[in-house]
């Protein structure tokens, strides 16, 4: 899974109308697409996938598109909640923004809050009795 610099540049350019700075970060051989610190897209092999929930997934299914799938443990396929974007959207910045905005809204809604690590302080050494 990789993403070419040209494809990444195209996606960032198409999403410029999102009114949020979009950035990308390499991850696990693919590339995550972020806005406001929230990952809402995934690029793998120069294919864009956007975050979906039960409601927005219907839009992808109506287009005949499927989720991003990778091989998990023992080769078992694992489907993620990122769905392939219709190719026509890659030619239309306005439509891309509509799809991206929906995915960003879903990602924000589903984002799990970070828990603060609870550190326990261990006493070093042996305690002495007086």
Image: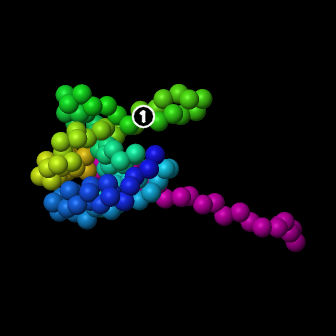
Residue depicted at x 58% and y 33%: 73
Q: Is residue 67 visible?
A: yes
Query: Residue beneath label 1, please?
Result: 69
Where does residue 76 sit, x and y in percent of width and height?
53, 27
Of residue 62 and residue 10, the one placed in the foreground of this image is 10
Quadrant housing residue 124:
bottom right
Where does residue 29 sit, x and y in percent of width and height?
49, 50
Where does residue 95 sit, x and y in percent of width and height?
13, 47
Q: Is residue 34 visible?
A: no
Element type at mark 1: strand
Of residue 78 and residue 54, the one placed in the foreground of this image is 78
Is 122 colored magenta in this rendering? Answer: yes
Query: What is the residue that sits farthest to the left in this orientation?
Result: 94
Residue depicted at x 18% and y 42%: 88
Where does residue 1 sit, x and y in percent of width and height?
46, 46
Q: How many marks?
A: 1
Q: How many neighbours does mark 1 have within 10 angstroms: few (below 14), some (14-19), or many (20 or more)?
A: some
Residue depicted at x 84% and y 66%: 126
Q: Examine the rendered structure and indicate whether residue 40 appears above or below residue 54.
A: below
Quadrant housing residue 36:
bottom left
Q: Examine the rendered structure and indicate whether residue 98 appears above or below residue 24.
A: above
Magenta-colored span: 107-130
Q: Examine the rendered structure and indicate whether residue 86 appears above or below residue 125.
A: above
Quadrant housing residue 22:
bottom left
Is 36 colored magenta in this rendering? Answer: no
């Amino acid at each position: 899974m990789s993403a070419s610099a040209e494809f990444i540049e195209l996606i960032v350019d198409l999403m410029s109308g999102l009114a949020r700075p979009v950035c990308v970060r390499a991850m696990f051989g693919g590339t995550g697409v972020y806005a406001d610190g929230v990952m809402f897209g995934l690029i793998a092999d120069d294919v864009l996938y956007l975050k979906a929930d039960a409601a927005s997934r219907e839009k992808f299914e109506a287009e005949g598109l499927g989720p991003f799938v990778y091989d998990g443990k023992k080769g078992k396929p694992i489907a993620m909640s990122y769905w392939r974007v219709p190719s026509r959207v890659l030619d239309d910045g306005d439509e891309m923004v509509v799809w991206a905005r929906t995915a960003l809204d879903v990602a924000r809604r589903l984002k799990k809050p970070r828990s603060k690590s609870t550190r326990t302080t261990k006493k070093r050494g042996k305690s002495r009795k007086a």
